[in-house]
């Protein structure tokens, strides 16, 4: 590799990183500039590395670590791009080695490709990014799972869903946040560390992009969209005792309705879990496949 230096990537690199991203990523992954800026430069504790040649940025890599206690293995290479004119010269490899070195210094020993906590841009590596898949495999990453995005028309939000007696759907706001946060912690033990961080940005959208289902002041479910990326739905959850009563469908439709009012024709359900539920309620179809790859650091 000829004279490529690695240094800390800093916010003034934003335009250079975004323009490389526009050259090498799908438009869907590079055009949401505001959210990409927030993700890359405002995610807490993000590892940020730039590759520079002749004072020009030729690539950048970003890594996140989960804030969950005892999750020393939860590191993710959350975003990695190399300028097309500089690919296949070891730049990506050098960036990845540096990100891994910094993970190791944080005592993170298992690293995934794509994905990420507390924020993410993808759920893994999109199968369309063939070079990235080869690159990660060559670098010792092994497939561990796969996940999908589904796409649905926002028109599904035009239909109102019937709700069980006494249940109302409200928009999350700053006043409700503390009790909602406590409910997430108590009700969703396994998901809490991912979801609490993921939903918080929705609270700061105008209007907040999260709805909650309540009965007699008790939370029964929630659904959020536009958490990391515009037009991406999730996470959502209905309390086990309230499932199968139409609450999830109603929450999902409220989010679709908001997105329709924002002018969007379709939306993505990120890392769709219950695929039949999304198919049945809003006519969602699988639109993207992501591979989850992992590596244990020496
Ligand atoms: C993935 C990416 C960052 C790799 O950057 P790079 O600087 O070209 O990577 P390197 O030169 O260090 O490649 C190291 C090895 O990875 C493999 N590899 C990289 N690109 C490859 C390709 N297009 N086809 C097959 N193997 C490839 C090769 O084994 C390569 O070693 P070799 O050149 O000696 O054969 C770059 O292709 C890119 O920016 N892709 C678009 C962005 C992207 O998909 N990001 C992933 C989402 S996080």
Image (spheres, rainbow, N blue to C red):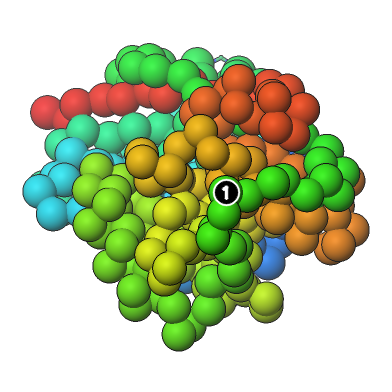
Which of 113/155 is in front? 155
Which of 46/228 is in front? 228
Q: Position of residue 100 (x, y in %)?
A: 27, 41
State the residue at coordinates (83%, 46%): 159
Q: Residue furthest front?
A: 165
- Cβ of disc 1 within 8 Å of ligand 1? no
Residue 73 in the image: above or below residue 47: above
Residue 119 in the image: above or below residue 171: above
Q: Position of residue 257 (x, y in %)?
A: 79, 55
Which of 191/24 is in front? 191
Please say whether residue 42 is visible from this viewpoint.
yes
Q: Position of residue 116 (x, y in %)?
A: 40, 45
Q: Position of residue 258 (x, y in %)?
A: 76, 60
State the residue at coordinates (48%, 83%): 174
Please say whether residue 129 is visible from this viewpoint.
no
Which of 112/98 is in front? 112
Residue carrying label 1: 164
Q: What is the quadrant of residue 34 in the picture?
A: bottom right
Tag 1's secondary structure?
A: loop
Q: Which quadrant of the figure contains the C terminus?
A: top left
State the residue at coordinates (41%, 61%): 219
Q: Is residue 100 left or right of residue 267?
A: left
Q: Is residue 233 left or right of residue 160?
A: left
Residue 273 in the image: above or below residue 119: above
State the residue at coordinates (71%, 61%): 33
* Circle 1 Cα neighbour tier, 10 Å, few/some/many (<14 / 14–19 / ≥20): few
Please count the marks in the image. Answer: 1
């Amino acid at each position: 590799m000829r004279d490529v230096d690695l240094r800390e990537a800093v916010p003034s690199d934003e335009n250079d990183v975004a323009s490389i991203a526009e050259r090498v990523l799908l438009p869907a992954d590079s055009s949401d500039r505001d959210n990409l800026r927030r993700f890359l430069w405002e995610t807490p504790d993000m590892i940020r590395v730039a590759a520079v040649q002749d004072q020009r940025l030729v690539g950048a890599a970003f890594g996140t670590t989960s804030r969950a206690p005892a999750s020393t293995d939860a590191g993710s290479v959350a975003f990695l791009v190399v300028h097309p004119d500089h690919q296949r010269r070891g730049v990506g490899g050098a960036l990845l080695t540096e990100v891994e070195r910094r993970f190791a210094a944080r005592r993170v020993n298992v690293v995934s490709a794509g994905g990420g906590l507390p924020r993410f841009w993808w759920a893994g590596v999109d199968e369309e990014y063939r070079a990235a898949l080869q690159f990660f495999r060559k670098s010792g990453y092994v497939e561990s799972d796969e996940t999908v995005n589904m796409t649905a028309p926002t028109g599904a939000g035009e239909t109102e869903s019937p709700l069980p007696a006494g249940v109302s759907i409200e928009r999350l706001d700053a006043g409700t946040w503390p009790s909602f946060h406590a409910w997430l912690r108590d009700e969703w033990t396994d998901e809490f560390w991912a979801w609490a961080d993921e939903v918080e940005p929705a609270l700061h959208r105008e209007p907040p992009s999260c709805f909650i289902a309540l009965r007699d002041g008790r939370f029964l479910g929630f659904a959020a969209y536009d958490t990391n990326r515009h037009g991406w739905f999730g996470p959502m959850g209905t309390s086990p005792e309230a499932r199968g009563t139409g609450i999830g469908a109603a929450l999902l439709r409220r989010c679709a309705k908001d997105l329709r009012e924002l002018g969007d024709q379709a939306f993505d359900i990120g890392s769709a879990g219950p695929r039949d539920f999304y198919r049945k309620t809003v006519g969602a179809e699988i639109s993207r496949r992501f591979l989850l790859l992992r590596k244990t650091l020496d």
